[in-house]
Image (cartoon, rainbow, N blue to C red):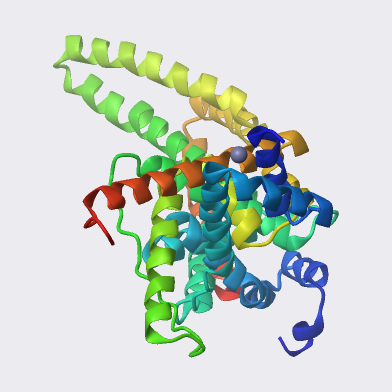
Amino acid sequence: MAMSLSASDLEIINQCLKGDMGQFEVLIERYKKLIFNTAYRMMGNKEEAEDVSQEAFIRIYNSLSKYNPEFKFATWALRITTNLCLDHLRKRKGETVPIDEQYDLGDGKLTPEEEYIRKEKQKLVQNAISKLPDKYKEFLIMFHHRNLSYQEIMDITGESLTIVKNRLYRARQMLKESLMNTERESEKYAMPGN
Amino acid sequence: MQCREIDALVMKYLDGNISEIEMELIKKHNENCASCAEEFAVLSDAIYTLEELPDIEVPEGFTARVMSSIKEQKRFALTPQIVLLWIIGLAGLAVFMINVVMFAVIPAIKSSGILIAAYNIMVYSGTIISNAIKDFFVFGSLALSKLLIFRTILLSEYLVFVVASIGVFIAANMLIVRTLKLQQKL
Ligand SMILES: [Zn+2]
């Protein structure tokens, strides 16, 4: 294990393939934050995010021999993760699943009022995103939450640049419309003069 | 400028791929267009919020849980060798059963002198079943075709029945030894 901390992803994968499965732990440690947080934003709650991330790592382990070193390991791992998320989201059609409250502790730079407003905003946005069709949600999260480039998203999803751009465009439009509707709804109930 | 064009520029802005001139165009348009201004405010605010959503901590013990699931599945994994051993074992068992029927059950019924009709039906269905099994074996594998030859010999020589039993015994033992070795490896 000691040597592995500085080893490259590919070196570790080769070790695993030679039968040293303990090395896989290093890969999990390296990528669990990325995988778990992506799954968390896709699924909306911690429990499902953990289930999906565990399943993702097991799948990654089982298909290590199919890893193509032309791609970054993170890209390949995200591809497996987002596909699993989409599977799970498809399966839960119709069921309502709670969206977690933010676990964000804030950094103390904001006043309590500002902190409150920020949390409310996060809730609104999270809610609007959770209602987007899965495929659009995926692109929005990858680009704007995980900060992935067009090229990386193309590698992960296997879609063309045109499709990536279009999906992202549509996703933003839907997000905007959803939020503006919510705004109008709340204005309807707000007291005049407020 | 048209609202639609501004919309395209806003997308460029959100891509993080906008020039200063284009940014000026958005600002100028929005000063005179309330709906574009509102849409811009709502969307850029939402995207900013999304980008700033904090990462949360991975649950305690996550890595250990994944590793133990992997070990668990490995224990029950079907490698080609294990599948082959299972086939040999099961085939041996089938041969054994056929011989029990042929040389013990059927003669017993025959010599009892009763249930002749029932015996005929049994032989008839037994033939169909054993033919089906035979077909399966033929297409099974190299090991199975060898067993078929083995079985033909068995049919003519009652003595070989004993050898078949030993074969089953050996196959079962191989299976046990193999499984034990696998467990030690883990
Ligand atoms: Zn306009």
Residue B93 at what x, y percent from top left? 44, 41
Quarter residue A181 falls in: top left
Where residue A61 sits: x, y (%)? 63, 61
The residue lying toward the viewer, choosing from B3 and B88, is: B3
Query: In the image shown, does B49 or A35 lie closer to the viewer?
Result: B49
Closer to us: B30 or A30 = B30
Residue A39 in view here: yes
Of residues B95 and A164, the one drawn nearer to the viewer in this rendering: A164
Can you give x and y, in whole percent of width and height, for residue A126 in the image?
A: 43, 58
Q: Residue at x 18, y 9 (%)?
A: B117
Q: Is residue B58 above or below residue A164?
A: below
Drawn side of residue A187 relative to residue A174, left or right? left
Residue B115 image point, x, y percent = 15, 15
Q: Residue at x 23, y 15 (%)?
A: B119
Vertical arrangement, residue A145 with respect to residue A86, above or below? below
Placement of the C terminus of chain B among the 4 image quadrants: bottom right
Ligand 1, by image quadrant, is top right
Q: Is residue B40 left or right of residue A1?
A: left
Residue at the (66%, 58%) spot, across then down: A77
What is the quadrant of residue B7 in the picture?
top right
